[in-house]
Image (tube, rainbow, N blue to C red):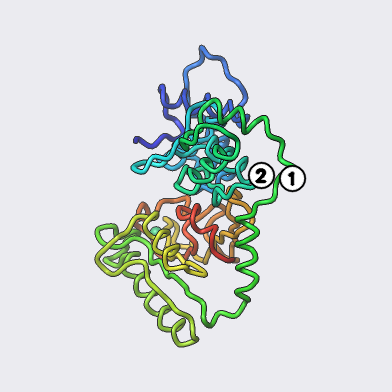
């Protein structure tokens, strides 16, 4: 899809404006007025991105667009079922998962993705309540879900289990399995300056870290080699399948100012599935906004770089790992 940013006009902008209004992030506007992506819309997009733990850049790209679309669904708006090829995502799926969890059915992590575990939990619910066991969340199932009053609201067994696992794992680093994720790779070079690319730098850094970690008794695994570039979901899947205690995603950033320098760390904890990431900024850091807000690779005149750890794009899976 085409990126939408401040200054753009058109039907796509109208759609985004109406979604943001529906979400209470933008005041209603005159329907006769031309649909402009103005400063107010940009602020609303930034607020939305912050709420959803997305990269905060005020630009509507594929991830923000998908999240905006997901946010428009409420439980009962459409039938929901497990689709192997392209799992359904949306706030309605999240509501279903939370409802099932409240009723004591293990739908896994409430992440807004209708996966196999959600289907199994839904079937168990349907079986127990005398509904047709088809794993499809249609009007009858929604009605049954709404009629039942759970004795206890809130509380997330999945999160409690995870917190317990983190607590049991202790704070010692030796014996931990760490996945190091050098950003970019293969054809994707990331930020490149004077023939030096982010992809190579980060692989070099990752290998050095791997050696140091191994020397102190940690088990370190890399998500990629010099010639490949797994997408972010593949990197997250790799770490989950490895049962990693922690993933470190490494990037170096670019800035057009020669004075820019510093290090930023973004970390993703286990508190809630949809909480925005916390970012910690070291003194001397380059700008007031997220360094990853500027897409890597766009600032060719970079003179200095910082390193950011914990790729925001890996958010849905990262929340499994310990802080
Ligand atoms: Zn990067």
What residue sits 45% from the left and 52% below the top?
313
Label 2 neighbourhood size at 10 Å, few (<14), some (14-19), many (20+)?
many
Q: For residue 115, which numbered disc appears in the image?
A: none
Q: Is residue 32 left or right of residue 82?
A: right
Vertical relation: 280 (above or below) 218: above
Q: Name the residue under label 2.
A: 102
**Which quarter of the rendered image does ligand 1 occupy?**
bottom left
Residue 135 image point, x, y percent: 47, 38
Label 1 neighbourhood size at 10 Å, few (<14), some (14-19), many (20+)?
few
Quadrant (top left/top right/bottom left/bottom right) for the N terminus:
top left
Q: What element carries label 2?
A: helix
Q: Is mark 1 on a helix, strand or loop?
A: loop
For the residues labelled 2 and 1, say whether their Cβ atoms are less than 8 Å apart.
yes
Q: In this view, does 67 lie to the left or right of 50?
A: left
Front-most of 41 and 142?
142
Residue 115 image point, x, y percent: 45, 46
């Amino acid at each position: 899809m085409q990126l939408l940013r401040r200054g753009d006009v058109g039907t796509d902008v109208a759609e985004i404006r109406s979604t943001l209004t529906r979400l209470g992030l933008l005041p209603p506007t005159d329907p006769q007025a031309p649909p402009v992506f103005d400063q107010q819309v940009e602020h609303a997009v930034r607020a939305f991105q912050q709420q959803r733990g997305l990269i905060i850049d005020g630009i509507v790209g594929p991830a923000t667009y998908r999240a905006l679309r997901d946010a428009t669904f409420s439980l009962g708006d459409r039938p929901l079922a497990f689709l192997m090829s392209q799992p359904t995502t949306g706030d309605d799926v999240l509501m279903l998962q939370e409802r099932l969890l409240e009723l004591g059915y293990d739908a896994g992590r409430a992440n807004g993705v209708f996966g196999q575990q959600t289907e199994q939990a839904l079937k168990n619910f349907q079986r127990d309540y005398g509904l047709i066991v088809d794993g499809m969340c249609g009007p009858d199932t929604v009605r049954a879900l709404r009629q039942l009053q759970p004795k206890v609201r809130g509380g997330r067994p999945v999160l409690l289990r995870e917190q317990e696992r983190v607590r049991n794992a202790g704070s010692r680093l030796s014996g931990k399995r760490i996945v190091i994720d050098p950003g970019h790779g293969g054809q994707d070079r990331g930020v490149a300056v004077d023939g030096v690319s982010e992809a190579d730098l980060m692989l070099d850094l990752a290998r050095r870290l791997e050696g140091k970690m191994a020397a102190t008794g940690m088990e370190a695994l890399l998500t990629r080699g010099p010639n490949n570039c797994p997408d972010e979901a593949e990197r997250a899947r790799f770490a989950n399948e490895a049962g990693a205690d922690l993933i470190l995603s490494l990037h170096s950033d670019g800035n057009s100012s020669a004075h820019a320098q510093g290090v930023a760390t973004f970390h993703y904890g286990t508190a809630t599935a949809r909480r925005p990431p916390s970012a910690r900024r070291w003194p001397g850091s380059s700008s007031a906004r997220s360094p990853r807000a500027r897409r890597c690779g766009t600032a060719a005149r970079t003179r200095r770089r910082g390193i950011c750890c914990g790729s925001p794009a890996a958010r849905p899976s990262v929340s499994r790992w310990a802080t």
